[in-house]
Amino acid sequence: MSILVSAIGQGLTWGIVGIGLFLTFRILDFPDMTVEGTFPMGAATAVAAIYHGFSPLAATLLAFCVGMLAGLVTGLLYTKGKIPVLLAGILTMTAAYSINLRIMGRANLSLYGKSSLLDLFKGLPPYFNSVFLGMIVIIIVTALIIYFLQTNLGQAFIATGDNSNMAKSLGISTDTMQIMGLSVSNGMIALGGALVAQENGFADVNMGIGIIVVALASIIIGEVVFGELTMNERLIAVTIGSILYRFVILIVLQLGFNANDLNLISAIILAICMMFPAFEKRFQLKRSLSRGISKHE
Amino acid sequence: MTKRSYPLITAIIILFAFLGYAFFAEKSDQNSAEPKTPTVGILQLMSHPALDAIHQGIIAGLKEEGYIPGKNINIDFQNAQNDQSNLKTMSSKFANENADLSIGIATPAAQALANSISDRPIILGDITDPKGAGLVKSNDRPGGNITGVSDKAPFKLQLGLIKRLMPNMKTLGIIYTSSDDSAVAQYKMFKALCKQEHVKLKAYSITNTNDLNQVAQQAVNSVDAIYVPTDNTIAGAISTLVGAANQAGVPIFPGVDTMVKAGGVATYAIDQFQLGVATGKMSAEILEGKKKPATTPIKYFTKSKLIINERAAKKLNIHIPASLMKEAQTKGEIVK
Amino acid sequence: MSEPIFELKDVVVTVNQGTPEEINIMDHVNLKIYAGDFITVLGSNGAGKSTLFNIIGGDLKVTSGEILLHGKDITNMSVEHRTRFLSRVFQDPKMGTAPRMTVAENLLLSKKRGQVRGLGARRLKQNMAEFEEITKTMPNGLDQRLNTPTGDLSGGQRQALSFLMATIKRPEILLLDEHTAALDPQTSAELMHATNMRINKDQLTCLMITHHLEDALSYGNRLIVLDHGKISYDVKDGDKDALTKEKLLTFFNDIDG
């Protein structure tokens, strides 16, 4: 049973990364590769800061700020430098590798024996410290984003992603909106990195590899499982999707699958999830499902 | 809230209900029955010959101490494929199945285990610097639940061998992966040794296998020989390095025997398999309660054997003195 | 006669400068627009109608000349800045609305056209009554669909909404760029009728590009014809009332009546 609790704990922590990516991927509607550099940057910053005597809370907030800077760089490259956003993100991500090595001074920095945010939750049953930490952060973050999206600025932000030409004609500075979105998004991803590093007990310069797939999985599983929802509900669904993704990995491992196959299985699951809407249409799944159910009543 | 929101709300309710149940259930359920057959978890960072050899050695070492997998011991072997989140998930798995003892092959694996398990022993296999990795308080008295075997390479012997086989060498090059902590640690130690022995050393680093080709080309044009420490990344792409070096007629002196077999010239190599055996034996002793991790000092496995690749030496016109050939024949290994 | 609220002074736009293809797509244009003018704009393809709108809107920079608003020089004012007093409806129904946001949300965004948007709550519910009232002026059921994402609406509904969005916050100058051209004849006529009612009711200053001769003649108090970047014809009030379709046709070639 603790294995399930551990999966939930990880799902909550990684949910923050998912919500961060949601802002750029779903609302602004573009692929941000910066995240693969920002995630380890958050981890490296937090661990290095704790190493140098910062409190875990200060270290984690510092990681958030550093992430925002990274997003800002990508935003400027894209809006002012006119570099296509995918490439802009890749540039920042590539630069981040060297920067992360500098931050830590080495490729891999351990927190073993040092303090972390998890210390706030001592004396609980196994893995509940992650669950509580993750839960608190997710609730705060989700609430803030929900509030933000319902302000005038938030509406302008959504409009920019929905129809940027219309937004411009309404006097919205789409450049500013996009920079802001990239900034906040990467800040959150760095925050996720900082939390994951404290949970795992170390930061590693290669931690970011493949995390865009993990973050996408959370978003897409949430959408496929829960269907069409309001914007606020979709944000919550990302976190649940993240937890479900962790469950799937768990099942795969318990079934005895070779860890070598994990990447392939993740890709298959994600592909199926993404093709699901098309399947549904083709085979009228929903209709026949509900017809089948009502027949038995 | 619309009907559409029902699945989401249901999911959240189930989640909280489960967490609540697990919270109170866990609190009272601290005494699970000990499984009769001990379970040993082995977490390997990734696949490559040196780490695989250690794995095999561990099984052999356990067997030597009377533990036969499947009969009186369960081995749970997990390969993390160099993925950080896998390391975490697999360590949690060991913790959850109450593995009596866990073994970590390579530093990141050991660190992941250390983070998940604090109440059962963890044995390190192939960790260059346990104290530096934050795993033990001191290498003599680990102090916690972690101890193990370290693979301190016999740098002095290796450098001596290089000097003997390359008497006219002006510059020695070294190539390592900057993102591999253990490789970086070895580089630093080797660099200090070269300074001591007045050997001119030129350093080259790569971030991943993609850089290797270009960096190798650069290196082979500026040095007379290249030393490669125990480096997981380069080990996986050794043929690229060997190819570039052979083209330029520059010999490679690796730190591991598997790399000599792949085209390096010669080295004094720690027998990875034997290192594994030592790890397995130490694990057996701790399993039986004969020793405790806190008071078991890190074992430095320094026994090395001379391994010479005859074909590579011939190709690069390196003359191997008869005494060395004899030593390799009797106490080491010759690769044809 | 009062002062013009909007004026183009000797505006020239040159393209392909320095090459053999150099040409003035706006050729010394002078235009005085007075408060309350409802000007229909005609011209054959390539005559410069959209160019005129792009200059007024700021999407295109002039090569020489001045643009004045209430006598103030706004020639170099950015597009963003101009949205404070200017709004525009395009021909394509998809261009004017955000498809994933609801009708009400779109209207709310338009209400703040050109204003700084801060972290204050959006107050959507408080505005619903006003939105209901406004959408009732359109005959296509928009008022029943305030909470529908605009992507689910028909072209006619989206275009009607675009018009409402352009006028919910009073613009000093309204540009209608063939805004009924992409609709079927009935929807087109309905929208045109509603447009006219609104412009008259609020005394809006408006320029409307159209290819329909009848619309050009029957709506508005003023009519201009563009030809090769120049304003070749400018009639208003009585002269416009007296204008016939035949006389108009003599002024240019391909037009669909």
Image (spheres, coloured by chain):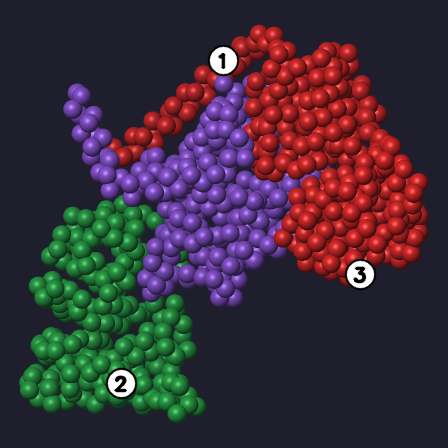
Q: CA distance from mark 1 to mark 2?
A: 82 Å
Residue at image position (54%, 35%) is A260
Check if mark 2 and mark 3 are on a common chain.
Answer: no
The shade of chain C is green
Q: Quadrant of residue B271?
A: top right
Report whether A192 appears left or right of B16.
right
Report whether B166 appears left or right of A131.
right
On screen, residue C89 above or below A39:
below
Residue at image position (16%, 51%) is C143
Q: Quadrant of residue C27?
A: bottom left
Disc 2 residue type (three-letter): Leu
On screen, residue A282 above or below A293:
below
Residue position marked by numbered label 1 in the rendering: B25
Report whether A93 appears left or right of C239.
right
Residue at image position (73%, 39%) is B258
Residue position marked by numbered label 3 in the rendering: B222
Q: CA distance from mark 2 to mark 3?
A: 75 Å
Residue C69 point in image, percent of width and height: 33, 78
On screen, residue B183 above or below B88:
below
Residue at the far bottom: name it. C20
Residue position marked by numbered label 2 in the rendering: C31
Q: Secondary structure at mark 2?
A: strand
Chain identifier of the residue bearing label 2 in the image: C
